[in-house]
Every structure is written in C-alpha cells, then in structure tokens.
Amino acid sequence: MSYRRPVPTIGDATSAAERAQEPDAWAMPDDLASLERVVGARRDIRRYRPDPVPEDVLTAVLTAGHRGPSVGHSQPWRFLVVTEAQTRDTAALMADRCRLRQAAGMAEESARGLLDLRLEGIREAPVGVVVACDRRAPAAGVLGRATFPDADLWSCAAAIENMWLTARAHGLGLGWVTLFEPAELKQLLGLPDGVETLGWLCLGWPDERPPEPGLERAGWSRRLPLEQVVMRERWTERDAPTSHLRAPDQAHVVGARDRSDDLLTVPGSLGVLDSVLDRITALPAVDGPGTLVVAAADHAVTAYGVTAFDPSVTADIARATREGTSMGAVAAASAGLAVELVDAGIGCSRGDLVTADALDEPTYAALLALGLERGRALAARGPVGLGEVGVGNTTVAAAVAAGLLSVPADDVVGRGSSADTAMVERKRDVVRRALDRVGAVAAVGPHEVVRRLGGGELAVLTGVVLGVAEAGGVVVLDGLATSVCALAAVRAEPAVAAHLVAGQRSREKAHAAVLHELGLEPLLDLRIRAGEGVGAALATGLVKDALALRRGVARTSAV
C-alpha cells in the first residue's frame, strides 16, 4: 500500500526525495550576477555628502543587519543610531587622538603613511551606527558559545557585512571605523557593563566612488590571490597525520538520512536512537544477529587493596560466560547476540601500574593484533558489543582515562563495585602514583597509554574496536573500561568515531567525561555497574529493534 507523505503545515515542506532529485533547487540563479556585483563593489567609504539618508533606506540597512546569522540565534547585536552633531564631534576627536597614538608607535615611514590616509568620516557622514554586542548572557547558556565564547562578536560582524552590502545596493556608502579606545566609546554612548562595541559605522551618500579598495589604491596593501588563502583539509604548513581508516563518505551519510525521511513518522521521532541509526546505517556492515565480545584478564594492581572482591572472581565469571550463564552472556542471549570470550590474561597478573607497566611491548602488540583479527571477522555478523571481566579494572580504566584525557586522579576515580571510602582513596593513590611514574604519557600516543596503564582485556578490546571499524561495522560500548578502549582507538584513528555507539553511561566517575570526549550520547542511563557487557548487550538489542522498526514502518511517496 502506498502512503502519502505527512507534510507539515509549518516549516520545511520538502521531502528528502525532492531534495535528492534537485539538490540545487534552492538556488536563486536570477540573482547571482547582481549578488556578485554588489559583493565585488563593496567599499570602505570615507568621504560623504551631507544629504540626509531617507528613513526607509536606513530601516532597510538595519533590517539587513538584524537578519544576520547569530550563534544560537542569540541576536546579540544592538544598533545605536547617532545623528547628533555633538556626539559625532566627540567621537571624531577620539578617533583623531587614537590615530595619532597608533602612528607614534610605528616606524617613521609607516607612521607618515598612516597619517596620510583618510581613515574616518565621522563628522561628514549624516548617520553614525554603532554596533554593540550584548554579552551579558553567560556564554555557557548560549548554544555554540560554550566552546567559542567570542562567537557572539562574530555574529555582530556578520550583521555588519549584511548592512554593508545592503547599503551598497542602495547606493549608500558605509565605512567601519575602529580607531577608538573601546572604553572611551563605551562611556560616550553610555553602554552598560557587559555590552561591547565593534566600532563606529559611518553611513551616508558617498562623496567618492572608488573602483578598488582605498587602502589598496593608496599602496598600503593589496588583495592576496585566492589560492594563497585557501587550504584543503588542514593547515598545509605541517605534514598531515597518516590515517588508515575512513568514515562513511558524504553520499552514504546523506543517503541514510534520506531513507529515514521516507518513513511514515515525524522526523526525529526516536530521539537519540534516530541520530544513532542515521549514523550507523551509513556503514556497510550493520545487519546481522551480532556478537558480544567479552575480554577477561587479571590485574596485579589488586594487591594494593583497590577492590572488594578476590581476584579469583575473574576466572569464575569468565567460566560462566563460556557456559552462557554470566550476567553478560544471559543479556546477550536475550538480545539475540552470540558471545565470544577472549582470554587476555586470566591467571597472569602482569605489571601493577605503580612500579611497572601493565604490559610489555611484545605482549601488548600480540593482544592488540588478536583483537584486530577478531574485530575484522565479527564486523560482518552485525553489531559488536563490548564487555570486559577483570577484578580491579575500574582502577585500571580510571588510570587510562586520566592518561588519555590528561586529567588528575581525583577527576576519574569512582567507587567501582562496592568500594568504601577508604578503598576509593587507595584507588586514587594508586592512580596518582601510576600517573607520576609514566609522566606525560598521552604525548607518546594512545597505544602507549593503554600498554603502560591498562591491561590485557583493554589491549584486546582496543584492537576489536579498530578491527570492526576497519571492516565497516558497528561497535556498541558498555562501561568505562570499554569506552577508554574506544577513546584510544579514536585517538589513533579519528574515523573510528563514526562506528561507535554509546550503549550506556555507567556509575563510574570518568565515564561521562570519556563519552563527552568521544562526542557520544548514551542510549541508556541506568547506573549499571555489572560490567561483563550487560549494558552493551541491552543497548545492542535496542539498536537491533530500532533497525527492525525502520525496516518495518510504512514508507511514504515522494509527493
């Protein structure tokens, strides 16, 4: 049966099929030549006629600025329109003083060149517009400013460019004057604390019509050739790192999103799951029953009293996993996953972190290669969930997290399974001493962090992540230990990130920070502390159900 696509009465009414059929349908070809002429003819005008600017034209210029792009749609700009002669005269005096101060700090020839230039038209232009940026909203509360706090100022600069082009199209001249001490201009205009200016815009009918930029005509500078300012992929003055993996290409990423757009449902109806499905269905190896890989190893660090359980429990849980009766194995079976146990060092406690590296180089290389081989082989069978067994490995995982994130022990050490206050403090002490021993290990590389601060199961799982990604498959993470393996793999091969799904966020203190570094939202947040891949198995079952849901839901027609 064919269904009509639900078309919203507000917002974008187009479908993915329509956009795929005509990707350039949003173009405005009749306006391109005019836009090119306006952009090419924009000039920084310094000489003005005294004729007034009509109010409707001024409004058009200000409206263009107000339609500019702003970070988090914060619209931080405020436009102060100045026409009073006294204010203009005072501002002009400030600019003159600033120009002389700047010239005084230059070499004589450059200073004379600066003084010869006409750099402002504040007195002559009939209108002054001061663009101010209201920065009183905390940066962390504005989408996009927590990472780039000055993006609000950039938004105001984008608004100025809109105004500049609109003024040019109307035949007005605009000049941007920044020869001010910001505090002086702020005081002149009575701006409150937390509001900053971006200088003064002179606006009026031009008394000059320069065919090229004024500073270029004056011999001050020249426009660089385009090829000198365009780089590809990264800054070309340094060698690019070698990468062996590639994330899905743009066609596959967009194709996956297009297929979801055809479903008879509201876009994004599954929330975080939709984002995960859009990403992983762009991968070549997604379908199949899937596998839970559980790696197990003992740790010599247990000798420091960092765990509430006897190290022999590792072997017991490993045996139950083989028999299909451990928590992880039962959870995997309920999700339709096969279970593969990898012995990464049961009964073989190696370095204790405090006095010696967890693994020597040959052992680490062998375990990593084992994981790579298993990951490559399992990727074609469907999603690969990760689990681990190793008494004491919450301390180990915390040490690896600290090494990869370059943070102190206090930021990463949590309770683990059933630890009391004294035991948590012993864990912190062990991690501190381990970090002191290895120094700035993160600078050496992610594999060295895992080798020196990790253990056998972490080495294997790091290899599994890399192998699955190399084969185009999906990796579903469990708790902190599996997530630090994924972070090490991403640090080694950034394209691995496209293959990862955060199955859950555990109770471990460092887990949220590691997931944040991976850019992943967890599917489950149940405070699980079982380990063994329980969270990964539950989440993999959820992912498989969601994939089946997408396959079974009715699809709409293109119209």
Image (tube, helix red, strand yellow):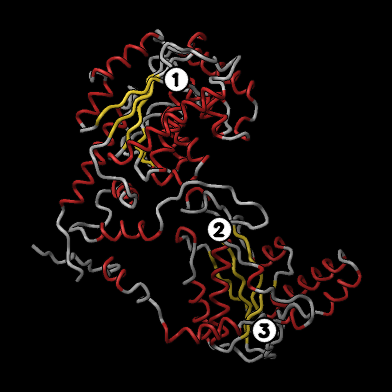
Say few, some or many: other residues with alpha carbon within 10 Å of mark 2 (under 14 / 14 to 19 / 20 or more). few
**In the displayed structure image, the side of residue 531 where residue 397 appears, left or right:** right
In primary-sequence order, the first of circles 2 and 1 is 2
Locate the C terminus and report the quarter of the image it occupies. Answer: bottom left
User: Disc 2 vs disc 3: which is toward the camera?
Assistant: 2
Task: Tell me which numbered mark, 3 or 1, is placed earlier along the sequence.
Answer: 3
Quarter assignment of residue 260:
bottom left
Mark 2 or mark 3: whose residue is earlier in sequence: 3
Q: Quadrant of residue 95?
A: bottom right
Horizontal and vertical percent position of residue 227: 64, 70
Q: Residue at x 48, y 67 (%)?
A: 69
Q: Read off the residue under disc 1.
A: 393
Callout 1: few (<14), some (14-19), or many (20+) C-alpha neighbours within 10 Å? many
The residue at the point 35 percent across, 31 percent down is 386
Measuring from the top left, give residue 541's x and y in whole percent: 24, 36
What numbered label is drawn on residue 367? none
Q: What amino acid type should be assigned to the residue bearing mark 3?
A: Ala
Residue 143 place in picture, x, y as percent:
46, 53
Tag 3 residue: 125
Q: Is residue 557 above or below residue 406?
A: below
Residue in the picture at 69% in, 85% down: 212
Left or right of 52? Residue 69 is left
Residue linked to disc 2: 233
